[in-house]
Image (cartoon, rainbow, N blue to C red):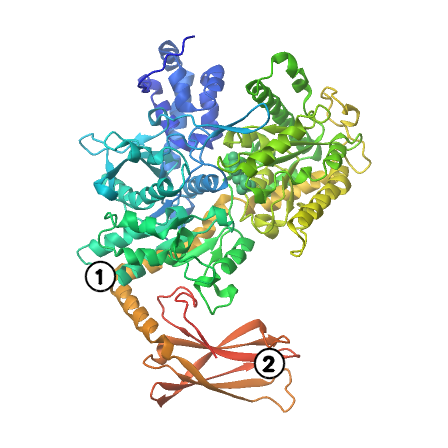
Amino acid sequence: MALVKAIRRFTVRTVLPEPIAALDTLATNLRWSWHQPTRDLFASLDPALWEESRHDPAGFLGLITREKMQELALDTAVVARVRAAEEDLRRYLEEPRWYQGLGEDAPQCIAYFSPEFGITEVLPQYSGGLGILAGDHLKSASDLGVPLIGVGLLYQAGYFKQSLSRDAWQQETYPVIDPDALPLTLLKESDGTPCVVTLPLPNGRKLHAYIWRADVGRVPLLLLDSNVPANDDGARSITDRLYGGGGDHRLQQELLLGMGGVKALRIYQRLTDGLAPEVFHTNEGHAGFLGIERIQELMSASEALTWDEALVAGRASTVFTTHTPVAAGIDRFDAAQIKYFFDAGLAPDVPTTRILELGRESYDGGDPAVFNMAVMGLRLAQRANGVAKLHGTVSRAMFSGLWPGFDHSEVPITSVTNGVHVPTWVDPKISSVAETFEPGSAVGGRWDLVFNVTDEQLWETRRELRARLIDDVRRRLRAAWTKRGAGAAELTWIDSVLDPDVLTIGFARRVPTYKRLTLMLRDPARLKRLLLDPEHPIQIVIAGKSHPADDAGKKMIQDLVRFTDDPEVRHRIAFLPNYDIAMARTLFPGCDVWLNNPLRPLEACGTSGMKAALNGSLNLSVLDGWWDEMYDGSNGWAIPTASGKASPQERDDIEAAALYELLETQVAPRFYGASGSGAGAESAGAAGPSTEPPSRVPTHWISMIKHTLSHLGPQVSADRMLGDYVSELYTPAAVAGRRAVAEDFRHARELAAWTKHVRSNWSQVHVEHIDSGGLSEVPQIGDKLHVSAYLNLGVLNPADVLVELAYGRVDDSDQLTDVSLAELEPNENLGNGRYLFNGAVMVEHSGAFGYTVRVIPRHDGLASKAELGLIVNA
Ligand SMILES: *Cc1c(COP(=O)(O)O)cnc(C)c1O
């Protein structure tokens, strides 16, 4: 065929006959991406076309001929099923759900901003964990009835498609999407013209963007698209691809996301007569400019607030989530670049110097010329969190420079452990196994039902999932090799790649160096022995994309693929190009063990292991991220971590050796049953797959699966995560936000004035003298320690401060450990700003005991003691 390139393309939408017109609604609402009955309905209309459309309902409808449409519209059974599905969707969208049972404090509307959203492979607007988490957040919000609106960008080429060259080097292509062919609706004014968001750019240029709406169940997702005719070429390509270029390109993406995103929300609110968001959630630093746009709104409004007042009001209702302790994951721009863009009038009422201060790394080791988006995110949000308990601890230490004088444990960053959207990630085979015993019960809630399933039945299901994965692996390998230039005759070996009765290990994730894709290759001979073990063989399926600019990551992929190319092992280890949601949904359920070996503690949470666990796959992981808090000794294995003193080389050696050891002595023997009567024992070499299921069911292994499903199921669910966000962050932020704006911003103005007063007079605050008494001659447990602190507060009042006695054990260098705090009460005004504060505590344990006194600002509008970063330690 000649290559004739079209100069313009458009997508003709199918017009459906009235009796089955609801198919359009069902295809447009992305609930189908996690609602199996809706997918089944589409598939049943024409199974072959459904496969051809790669399970994309909108694409599928486009493939159906007019004749076939007419035929379906005359089929009463089909019409009835379509109507029933539509009715089910309507009910899902309208009926009260969990959130509707909460009290009035819960916010009426929450805006959730994220640079990427991974909802389905049909909308390739994600690169990895961050985006898929955001997608799962929206889906669970929908299921729970949380009134959330998502805000993001629509990238024309999304993230890249990965393939391999003959010599195993990653190749990237960027297929362009056509929004008209996707389940998206363009927001239009009542006269039919598209709604437009406009931002000024330097040199008199302008950036215009359209707003597309995706419906994620009950949750609208607004996506800004700069590919509009009114833009010049530069502005038009701002949303060309996810995390495309560096520097200005990325900065403009983030300006559009944050500032344009708030403008888009306001338009949406106007068109739908909807409620204004009461809480704004900034999912990672990239979206942080939303805070500046909100301050701009407040400063320009008729009841104009000052900068300080607007900052207080905006912060009260903002939640910031940090997602990574890896430096490369945090956006840092030149401060000069920020100034250049804001001087163009992006936020005309906000002084640029104030914006620059928000992102300044004003702590030891910071770079004053840099504008740090995470630092701005923390300063613009009164509430912040990391994404697992360990990550909370790591983040508090990492950002402690912003709250000098406070112990790391008091840094105001909490944690909400990530979760995954159960209906998206549980394979229907697993959910139906549990449902067999209680028809109609949702797997989301009744994980304990797995104990009703017989070992044989569960084992058989696991084998089916493994076998299905193997079919998928062979299909993908064939395609990959064809792309690498191999002819069919060279590929007959692919028919016997992997064995449905061999212990299958999965490893798939992005390929930044800290995730150590190639740790398993540390001792290639040993890995080979494990793969080819005659009694307890293992097989490994691997996938992952490297960032296009990361040659170290690409080299790791190359090393790995070269290992898998070896004819001696290629039937036992495979690398699959182009990891995405579609592959993941077959891969997680098909693996017996999910491997994760990051450099601790750099994996903030990690979610793929959670998805594997939901399908009865056991985790084998370094104690990092979520595994650090959820590993319980019987739901998988912990790969030990080398001590911090080891060099990076030694560390890899030690941890790889521990991994091999675990596989050889624990994992494999248990999978094959202790006696080692494993099927697959005969299949070393390139023997074909065995057809008989193994006769022996490994009881201990299955008990671990049941334990994993019943215990981890509820904990790793995104419903649990959403519940945590609602109670710990969204509701307190809504309460604080409402209070800040009430009575014409009275509280915000008051808190801002008070903060200014306290800050400018804090240097006068001193602890002058401390007296103590009440102890026996030889102090004993049970003695009461009485403390009197003589303070000079300067112009501040006793009510402006919290005075605390900090006490506990002391070490050799007089450092307090295990600190307890007790409040001291103001007792006497001694004149000239001097006050006496008293209090007493009981001595509760023997050994070295010490205490000190500290003073911090106190106001009921502050969310944490450390909030202002002011403290006087005696
Ligand atoms: C879950 C998932 C991720 C994130 O996995 P991590 O374990 O957090 O690295 C990335 N890509 C896809 C396709 C996923 O499904």
Q: Nearer the viewer, residue 115 or 459?
A: 115
Q: Is residue 746 above or below residue 168?
A: below
Q: Amino acid at mark 1?
A: Asp
Disc 1 is placed on an element classified as helix
Q: Is residue 204 left or right of residue 254?
A: left
Identify the residue shown where x is 80% and y is 38%: 674
Disc 2 is placed on an element classified as loop
Q: Is residue 543 left or right of residue 702?
A: left
Residue 505 location (% of width, % of height)? 66, 35
Report crowding for label 2: few under 14, some 14 to 19, many 20 or more residues within 10 A (C-alpha).
some
Number of marks in picture: 2
Quadrant in which residue 528 is drawn? top right
Identify the residue shown where x is 20% and y is 31%: 193
Identify the residue shown where x is 51% and y is 64%: 408
Residue 828 location (% of width, % of height)? 39, 88
Q: Which mark is residue 744?
A: 1
* Residue extending furthest toward the top: 1
Q: Can residue 435 be seen at all in this image of the molecule?
A: no
Residue placed under numbered mark 2 in the picture: 843
Q: Nearer the viewer, residue 122 or 632?
A: 122
Q: CA distance from mark 2 to mark 1?
A: 49 Å
Residue 656 location (% of width, % of height)? 70, 43
Q: Amino acid at mark 2?
A: Val
Q: Nearer the viewer, residue 367 or 116?
A: 367
Quadrant in which residue 14 is drawn? top left
Q: Is residue 754 left or right of residue 434?
A: left
Q: Is residue 523 above or below residue 428?
A: below
